[in-house]
Amino acid sequence: MTAQEPAGGSSRLLDYRFDIVGRSKLWFTLSLAVLLVGLASMAFSLASLGTPLRLGLDFAGGTLLDLRFERPVTTDELRRALQEHGLGTSIIQLDTQTGQEALIRMPPLTEQERLAVEDTLRQQVGSFERRLVETVGPTVGRLLLRSGLVAVLISLGLIVVYLALRFQWDYAVFAIVALLHDVVLTTGLFALLGLTVGMEADSLFVVALLTIIGFSVNDTVVIYDRIRENLRLVSRRVSFAEVVNLSLNQTFARSLNTTLTTMLPLVTIAIFGGATLKGFAIALLIGFSLGVYSSIFIASPLLVWWRQRRYGGRVPSSAEG
């Protein structure tokens, strides 16, 4: 294999295929671009909806109807029927493939009010099967939102403690940076989906964030373990950037294959799982993609950047690494 110039500028002493660390600026720029898009989406959502994300029934409160009509219907037909009860601003999600399945989210209704709405829909739109009805008050919704945020913060705190005990402090810091990268970018992209296609964040979105956190940190730990193992095997003449590049190349296929295998059933759920599970599956698809990206292209290059500033690019001793 022809030798290339690694990130540190010296001739390559180790044999690997991709110089991932040498292209760190590209990876950081891509993340920054996605971050800016996400933050802009959250800001616009806050201005237009009052919250950084389009909140679902679990958090915002309201009455949800999941209906399956005997014939294809349109959003306009449903909205005209709802306007008779002053509910013309309700959120309607219609299955674009069949046109027969509709999710309607309205302000909290009593059972009598809901039955009246259903009678009007039958008379003006057509017969349907009620597959789900759910009502959550605004107070309960706020409590669920608060509990979900606390759960995410506690999980992040426990992971910080675990990483601090297992690795040197700088390893732990950049693993946490990668973790926050995944959570913030997933949230930002979900805000964009909320603005463009009406995707809502519900309690399953919090579950998705917790799953993403665990998946992402696991991938980073595997790579960091390989870096530490290689540090004990290579010569001190080898730069730290080369050791990290070698470790990333050794774990790249494993990380990619594991992520793709995990994502395949999620794609199936997103397509065939129905409206309730669709947002959950999409959040996991986004988060898992960002997780493998940050583990390879963010956490490790950041560690190299810091170690080069601290040790001048040399391979640290086993005590330091």
Image (tube, rainbow, N blue to C red):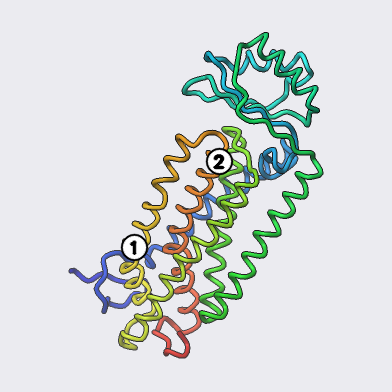
| Residue 105 image offset from top left, x and y in percent | 69, 29
Identify the residue at image location x=72%, y=55%.
147
Residues packed near mark 2 inside 10 Å, few (<14), some (14 to 19) or many (20 plus): many
- Checking the image for residue 279, the label placed there is 2
In the image, taking residue 141 as reference, residue 129 lies left or right, namely: left
Q: CA–CA distance between discs 2 and 1?
A: 27 Å
- Checking the image for residue 254, the label placed there is 1
Determine which quarter of the picture holds residue 233.
Answer: bottom left
Up-down relation of residue 240 to residue 208 (above or below):
below
Which of 315 and 131 lies nearest the eye of the viewer?
A: 131
Which of 214 and 28 lies nearest the eye of the viewer?
A: 214
| Residue 218 image offset from top left, x and y in percent | 47, 66
Residues packed near mark 1 inside 10 Å, few (<14), some (14 to 19) or many (20 plus): few
Q: Could you tell me the amino acid type at mark 1?
A: Arg
- Checking the image for residue 11, the label placed there is none
Q: Quadrant of the N terminus?
A: bottom left
Identify the residue at image location x=36%, y=64%.
20
Residue extending furthest toward the left = 1
| Residue 115 image offset from top left, x and y in percent | 74, 20
